[in-house]
Amino acid sequence: MHLLPQASRPSACPGLMRIVPARDGGLCRIRLAWGELSAAQARVVAHASRTFGSGFIDVTNRANLQIRGVREDSQEVLVSRLVDAGLGPLTPGSDDLRNVMSSPLTGLDPHALLDAVPLVSTLIGQMQRDARLHELSPKFALMVDGGERLAMLDHPHDVWLSAISAERFVFGLAGGPPQFENDTPALAAVKTGHVPALVDALLHTFLDLAQPWQTRMRDLLTTCSIEDILGRVQEKLGLPLDRDVEHWRRPTSDARLRFGVHRQGTGDSVYVGAQVPLGRLDAATLFALADLAPQLRMTPWQSVMLLDVPSAEAQAVVEQLAALGLATNPDEPFARLIACTGSQGCAKSFADTKADAHLLARSMPPAGNVHLSGCARSCAAAHRVETTLIAVAPGRYDLYGEAPEPLARHLTIEQAARWLARSPSDA
Ligand code: SF4
């Protein structure tokens, strides 16, 4: 396993990055290939955030970064700093395209079926350079899975591809790799070398068929059959698709690998992982992380991994992460809490979800994951969380479990904490 040398990675062109307005100022999205940025790039982001923004940086659930609170008179210089640091899009017009999501262990996991870095890099370049693909919705999501032990498998992807060996990938639409018996099976398999052509055919077929209101693959599947889509894809590819894949199941991901010290690749170095509380870093913390390791990776759990840490220094790095307020253990409250931007940064929010989550963290029960959402859109969680608190008024939430109906309504944070602490037999 190896990392591609920096020179072989996609490099940014001086195209425009779009800064979108939010309640707390401009929001600048920085898309990171496989979540990675160097310590030098992290310092550029931290400095830019402090100088041109509010000093806060969010880690997103697609392993990207967002600089928040960008002042209007600073947007041009901010973009120029980021582009100079190699953190902009590859081509003008491609900034809105979602990155290809892959495991935070891409290229690092000796147990993976292949090093997916070259393939992911090819796909990012292919998608950004094809101007027609810039028509895809910013929410259109693609996942490439090299079979790493840690992967975000629960997000609903428009297109997903999973290695079943170093030579072959299976794929599916509007979902994720099947892990359990009753999951929707993969659709077909292709050789690894044919994946770029397959993705090209799938994305162009989507654009050929989708009506303006059909921005996601699940929308297209309401009016088009899978067989119709696959027939067109096969025609574009000029290759038969191997449909004998219905029994394939992906091994489950081990989410605990994002915490603490783990071997990195086959060398002597280790990586150290920790959860960024509620996905929000301040500039000082990002500067401090950049001092701890030469490479950082953000993860779709809004956490961070520090790469290339000498094993003799790993325990000291864990202690420094804890001192910075990051959760280094999966049982800590901030390892089990997520919250959307909330009313500090989003006009749609009924409550200050981040402040309320900090309050809840003080009285979280010892187990269970909780998601606080400022409204029913649930931006912070693309996957199902055991308990969701949806704001209905400042400091007030409806509490949901698995069912679509709330289990309790209009709770304060203190009442929600008491509710969460009840044993199942009390319910
Ligand atoms: S979930 Fe609602 S309140 Fe929270 S960031 Fe998204 S739109 Fe805003």
Image (cartoon, rainbow, N blue to C red):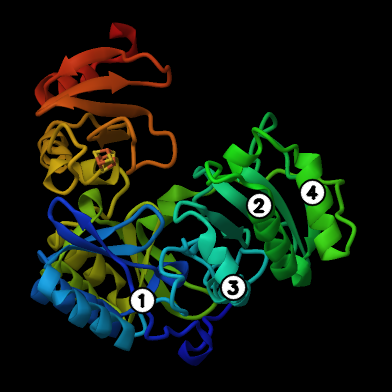
- Give whichever of discs 4 and 2 has the lower sequence position: 2
- Rendered position, 247 above or below 301: above
Residue matched to label 1: 37
349 lies left or right of 387: left
Classed neighbour count for the residue bearing mark 4: other residues with Cα under 10 Å, few (<14), some (14–19), many (≥20): some
259 lies left or right of 206: left
Between the residue at mark 3 and the residue at mark 1, the CA separation in whole angstroms equals: 24 Å
Between the residue at mark 2 and the residue at mark 1, the CA separation in whole angstroms equals: 31 Å
- Image quarter hosting the N terminus: bottom right
Classed neighbour count for the residue bearing mark 3: other residues with Cα under 10 Å, few (<14), some (14–19), many (≥20): some
What amino acid is found at the position of numbered circle 3 in the picture? Answer: Asp
Between the residue at mark 4 and the residue at mark 3, the CA separation in whole angstroms equals: 21 Å
Classed neighbour count for the residue bearing mark 2: other residues with Cα under 10 Å, few (<14), some (14–19), many (≥20): many
Q: Which of the labelled discs sits on residue 130, or is there none?
A: 3
- Give whichever of discs 3 and 1 has the lower sequence position: 1
Q: Position of residue 419 (x, y in %)?
A: 21, 17
Nearer-the-camera pick, 222 or 162: 222
Nearer-the-camera pick, 384 or 331: 384
What amino acid is found at the position of numbered circle 4 in the picture? Answer: Leu
